[in-house]
Amino acid sequence: MKKIFACLILLAGMQTSFAQIPVISSWIVNTTGATGYAGIASNVQIDQFDSNYVYISCTCIPGYSIGPWTGNPNIPKNQNFVFKIPRSPVQNTGKTDSVGLGQIAVWSNGVAAYNASDGMTYNNDGTWHRNAYYFEGVSFDNCLGHPDQSGCYHHHVSPTCLYNSVDSTTHSPIIGYAFDGYPIYGAYGYANTNGTGGIKRMASSYQLRKMVNRDTLPNGTILASAKYGPAVSASYPLGDFMEDYIYTASSGDLDSHNGRFCVTPEYPAGTYAYFVTIDSKQVPAFPYVLGYTYYGVIATGNTGPGGGHVTPPGGTVVYTPTGINEVTKVIKCTLEPNPTQDYTYIYIDPSSDNNITATLYNEQGQALQHFDYWHPSMSYALNLTGYTAGVYFLNLQTENTHTVQKIVKVN
């Protein structure tokens, strides 16, 4: 009895300790199976960690209502993301990493953050990069988000439905983490970096340039006429392009990365932190989330084509608001209905391993369907309508284990 009691005390102490580590405990974990858009599981599905990283499994669907998206033909889809966030971030003292297209950070509800660009340039010549807020803003929903061509719902600017963005009386909460491991706060922080001076809106140090013609870049480069942007006009007002802004050190509260080293409620000893930026009228202010480069060294596997599908290693621990558990390396699932005439639905048990590869075989051993990045706590549909009656086998496999499920198709 003494050993059991001691174990319970140790577990409670571990949970209290982990709850005091913001990068572990700041996530909105879905513990009830709640769903969001199109019935897709919402928020963060699994929050797990080891000594080096926190691994966030998410669908990219928030728990609140989203849409519609005016003029946008895309719809949100389950992204099956797994991001890894460094637990001990470090400043990059060498050549800093550029903040590229696609996901650059993850909000606390598992939705992706994007940079200020819409991915296109004027005349497609790669010089004047279009500002997503100006060119795509009409397609933003009331939460200031929208889906891209892959169905990834995301925010280029402050996610207004995630936190109280109009509360100027208290320090904003952590609303996400960049892929270098540093927190992203809402728009309000302490006036002074040492935590004194009351609360103020964090002002960007990027300012609109004073120009009529777009014939020079912010660094002073004089462009050849073929590289000119459109003249500033009612059709192309200042702010339409990212190059319309120039970074002026100390003109605002934040540096070129859109952050600063400061005391925050979660980091009383101080931390580097990014802040989303808005103006005095609550309008998003460039560069919105992060600047052109990260402050710290980014974790690999989160960005670029195919990024966001990291495989957590063995020995991770799952964190929830109510307890922690070691991840057991198994695959548990249920299939219903089975037998089936058309579809069977596979639910992956929360205790299962991450990043499951699924392959459907017929009795002759021929592979018929293949899927990557299935994750625990998720449901998946398997369409058998085009197959003849008979027995099929669903092979589920990870680096650590595998299982085979028998499926019977009937007429």
Image (cartoon, helix red, strand yellow):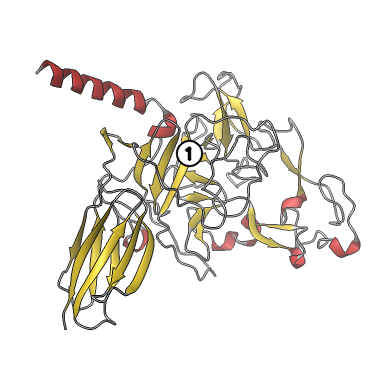
Give the image quarter of residue 67: bottom left
Q: Residue furthest top?
A: 2
Relative depth, front residue between 406 and 287: 406
Which residue lies at the image location 45% right of the left edge and 48% below the top edge? 310
Q: Residue furthest front?
A: 364
Give coordinates of residue 249: x percent, y percent. 75, 32
Q: Nearer the viewer, residue 216 or 234?
A: 216
- Relative to the observer, which residue lies in front, 55 or 147? 55
Element on which disc 1 rests: strand
Q: Quadrant of the N terminus?
A: top left
Mark 1 is surrounded, within 10 Å at the Cα level, by few (under 14), some (14 to 19) or many (20 or more) other residues, namely many
Q: Is residue 118 visible?
A: yes
Residue occupying the point 33% across, 36% down: 315
Q: Give coordinates of residue 357: x percent, y percent.
A: 35, 59
Residue 79, how many percent across, how many down?
43, 58
Which quadrant does the C terminus fall into? bottom left
Residue 317 x, y percent position in the rendering = 32, 35
The tally of labels here is 1
Horizontal side, residue 10 vs residue 79: left or right: left
Q: Label 1, on which residue?
A: 85
Can residue 235 be seen in this snapshot? no
Amino acid beneath label 1: Ile
Left or right, 31 with reference to 147: left
295 shown above or below 41: above
Residue ranking furthest to the left: 1
